[in-house]
Image (cartoon, grey):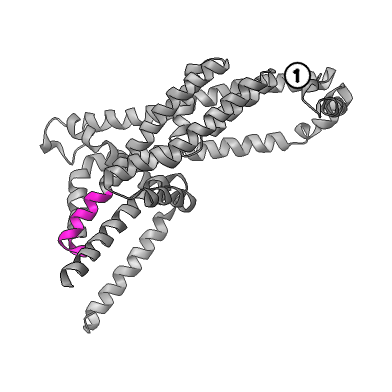
């Protein structure tokens, strides 16, 4: 650093301003990162929708349409799932209301469970078999607990909706100024790392796109294969549930929530063999897809070794949550590029 006091003061001032800016924006950093990930992934599509390159820097119909399309693709399945959840909650409320009047009889299959069937039936009758027992067991619903959970859920849902709208707004801004922003990022990379900085930035971009492509392909494949499994197991509406499984399958191991719930429904209906077969099939498919296929798809596109891709995915999720699925492999890809350049320099100087 220069010994010039003015230069030192300028550097300190810049650092302070950067820290203050980060502090002001820290609550929106995840939304900004999500918008950048979506923009990088869909930028080639936006370039095709852009009629003339001179329109860069303006809000175009292509940018608005693509932003709304992304919002619809994400919100439509969530909206459908929420509507089904509300419908099931209403049915559950009516069921519980009836249970407090007449009790809940044990399901016919409960007594057929090996070894613990009779004991389980007796416990069910003690807890829910009569109106008095059901009122006692379900008393917490009348103490305000359910209302508290409902308010918390509504608050979280509203917060997530506002965050998603923020992501779409930032995404529209990135589409509008993406060309200039990309040049600025490449210039900063060149300033920090020299000629190799541009390659690092392009490698990071390729890693993000490869991660998204891997997620989509895994989701489509697992949704299709699990849909076939649902049909063979006798689950109702296998196509819809398979599509829902495909959406969840984009997140590592999240598909277990869907086929696990379907397996429990089959058990409740007395189809124990079908439930066991569906759960085993889903677990094998999940382990193969998330531990082998997904890392191979992502790592192969950016020449990242399998083990570092796998560790990047799971390490990123553990550190950054869902956003870490993209950040982890991207960081590993850039670090691997830096490592390879360093080794090449050592070999050249040897």
Inspect this view and state whether residue 170 appears: no
Instruction: Please tell me whether the stretch drawn in magenta is mainly helix, strand or loop.
Output: helix
Q: Is residue 174 above or below residue 226?
A: below
Q: Indicate left or right for 279 with 61 as reference.
A: right
Query: Where residue 336 sits in the image (x, y, percent)?
Result: 30, 57
Q: Indicate left or right for 36 with 92 as reference.
A: left
Q: Secondary structure at mark 1?
A: loop
Residue at numbered disc 1: 109
Q: Is residue 65 above or below residue 335?
A: above
Query: Where residue 118 sits in the image (x, y, percent)?
Result: 85, 25
Q: Which residue is more in the foreground, 267 or 322?
A: 267
Question: Number of marks in the image?
Answer: 1
Image quadrant for the N terminus?
bottom left
Tell me where the magenta segment starts and ends, as one range: 190-204
Q: Indicate left or right for 247 with 84 as reference.
A: left
Query: Dot 1: within a 10 Å radius of its alpha carbon, few (fewer than 14), some, or many (20 or more) residues?
Result: some
Q: Quadrant of residue 7?
A: bottom left
Q: Quadrant of residue 200?
A: bottom left
Q: Is 234 contained in the magenta span?
A: no
Query: Where residue 330 sits in the image (x, y, percent)?
Result: 33, 50
Q: Is residue 246 above or below residue 27?
A: above
Q: Residue at x 27, y 46 (%)?
A: 302
């Amino acid at each position: 650093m220069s010994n010039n006091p003015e230069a030192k003061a300028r550097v300190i001032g810049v650092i302070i301003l950067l820290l203050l800016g980060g502090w002001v924006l820290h609550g929106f950093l995840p939304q900004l990162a999500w918008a950048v990930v979506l923009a990088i992934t869909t930028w080639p599509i936006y370039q095709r929708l852009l009629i003339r390159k001179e329109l860069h820097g303006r809000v175009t119909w292509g940018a608005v349409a693509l932003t709304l399309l992304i919002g619809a693709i994400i919100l439509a399945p969530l909206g459908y799932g929420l509507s089904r959840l509300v419908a099931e909650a209403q049915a559950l409320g009516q069921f519980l209301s009836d249970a407090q009047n007449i009790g809940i009889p044990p399901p016919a299959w409960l007594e057929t469970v090996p070894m613990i069937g009779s004991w389980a039936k007796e416990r069910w009758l003690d807890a829910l078999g009569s109106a008095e027992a059901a009122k006692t067991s379900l008393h917490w619903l009348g103490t305000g607990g359910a209302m508290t959970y409902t308010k918390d859920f509504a608050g979280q849902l509203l917060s997530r909706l506002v965050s998603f709208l923020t992501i779409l707004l930032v995404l529209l801004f990135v589409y509008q100024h993406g060309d200039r922003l990309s040049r600025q990022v490449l210039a900063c990379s060149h300033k920090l790392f020299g000629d190799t900085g541009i390659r690092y930035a392009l490698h990071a971009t390729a890693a993000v796109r490869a991660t998204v492509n891997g997620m989509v392909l895994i989701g489509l494949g697992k949704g299709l294969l699990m849909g076939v499994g649902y049909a063979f197991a006798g689950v109702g509406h296998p196509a819809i549930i398979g599509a829902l499984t495909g959406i969840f399958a984009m997140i590592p191991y999240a598909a277990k929530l869907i086929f696990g719930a379907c397996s429990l429904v089959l058990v409740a209906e007395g189809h124990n063999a079908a439930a066991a077969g569906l759960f085993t099939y889903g677990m094998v498919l999940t382990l193969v897809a998330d531990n082998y296929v997904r890392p191979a798809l992502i790592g192969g596109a950016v020449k990242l070794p399998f083990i570092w891709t796998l560790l990047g995915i799971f390490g990123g999720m553990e550190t950054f949550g869902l956003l870490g699925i993209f950040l982890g492999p991207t960081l590993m890809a850039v670090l691997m590029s830096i490592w390879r350049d360093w080794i090449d320099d050592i070999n050249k100087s040897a």
